[in-house]
Amino acid sequence: MKFKHTLNVLIDNFSVTYKQLLFRLVIWVITACLYTAILYPFVNGLTGSADFANLINGVKDFLADLVNGRNTEIAEATQRIKEAFESLLRLIADNRANIVWGVVGVSAVYLVSKFFSGLGNYAAAAVVNDKMALRAHSPFMVTLIRNLKSATLYSLIYSPMSFVYDTVCYFCAYLLVFRLLAMLPFVIIPLQIFLFVTAIIFIVCVKMTFTSDWLPALIRGKNGQKQAIVKTFSRSGKNTFEVMANFVVLCLLIIAVNFGGIIFTFGAAALLTIPASYIILVCFEFVNYYDREELKYFIDKNTIIKPEKEKVLTREEFFKGE
């Protein structure tokens, strides 16, 4: 039922997708410009070098000799490719300092983009909650400005935490799948790709499971940041494996829809499917929270989901709007 209610809430709040799209488009454009400013000098210096030109020419000569059947010249072309590639690696090694600073710059831009994306997620979550709890049509930017302090603190904590978790887990998955398993004789590349993608999905779902109550606890539960963090990572009595199973289904659905949209519409559908992917995850987090906390909520203007035993609000909770 959680999955069904999540889809209903997504449809009821689909207009948030367009607002999320505009917000993220601004972030993507600025981020792309900053990435270009950081990477262009190094990439341009690399592709404009004589070693890179020799490598490209060697590959072209090799392909021409192969197509024309000039077997005696293939070996010579192969040697030129090898020498050019080694020279290119030496050029890269000589620019290690620039590469390190480039990685630092790219990581910093990525963190900043994640921070602003976190602000957008918080605003979208607040708009969805207002609709679920009160049928209120809250403006996206007004909601963001009204909750800017809490959203900023949330994003400042969540973004670096997520970055470190993703970096460490993805690197470990890469070492395990493409390094350690590569030593086994029966392991082939398609199997490695399958295992790596599966590992990534599992890593993402674990993260979403253990942070699923963070936004609902802040927005609906009106908890402070410390209380919300403790609440989300405390999994006692929260059916963790059921929540994770739902996240796995959602992730697989999101991947399938996004790849289908990119392939069959030449990327046009991705303008809707990508921001909608973030919204459906937010919708599930709130549906899961409302159900577990035994709170009633709207899934559309005519349907209210009520718990079997409705929670009675105290006088203080009522006047606080909880």
Image: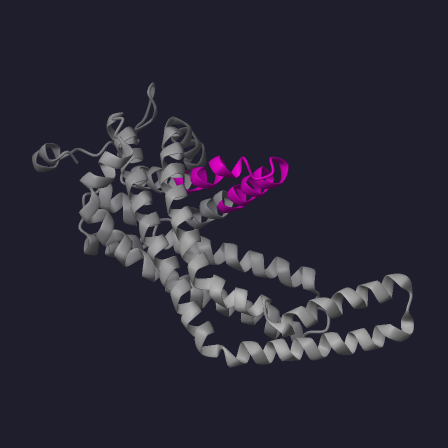
Q: Nearer the viewer, residue 39 or 232?
A: 39
Q: Quadrant of residue 299?
A: top left
In the picture provided, is 157 more to the left or to the right than 166? left
Q: Quadrant of residue 207?
A: bottom left
Locate the C terminus by quadrant. Answer: top left
Residue 8 higher or lower than 32, as above or below: above
Can residue 231 be seen here? no
| Residue at 90% from the left image edge and 62% from the top image edge | 68
Q: Nearer the viewer, residue 101 or 162?
A: 101
Percent x, y of residue 144: 24, 40
Percent x, y of residue 156: 26, 57
Can residue 42 be seen here? yes
Q: Nearer the viewer, residue 28 or 213?
A: 28
The region drawn magenta spans 251-279
Residue 194 higher or lower than 288, as above or below: below
Residue 81 higher or lower than 256, as above or below: below
| Residue at 48% from the left image edge and 78% from the top image edge | 96
Give the main secondary structure, helix, strand or loop, of the magenta stretch.
Answer: helix
In the picture provided, is 76 more to the left or to the right than 87? right
Percent x, y of residue 274: 47, 41
Percent x, y of residue 147: 20, 42
Give yes or no for residue 321 being in the magenta stretch.
no
Q: State the residue lying farthest toward the top.
A: 302
In the picture provided, is 224 more to the left or to the right than 316? right
Locate the N terminus by quadrant. Answer: top left
Residue 176 higher or lower than 190, as above or below: below
| Residue at 12% from the left image edge and 37% from the top image edge | 317
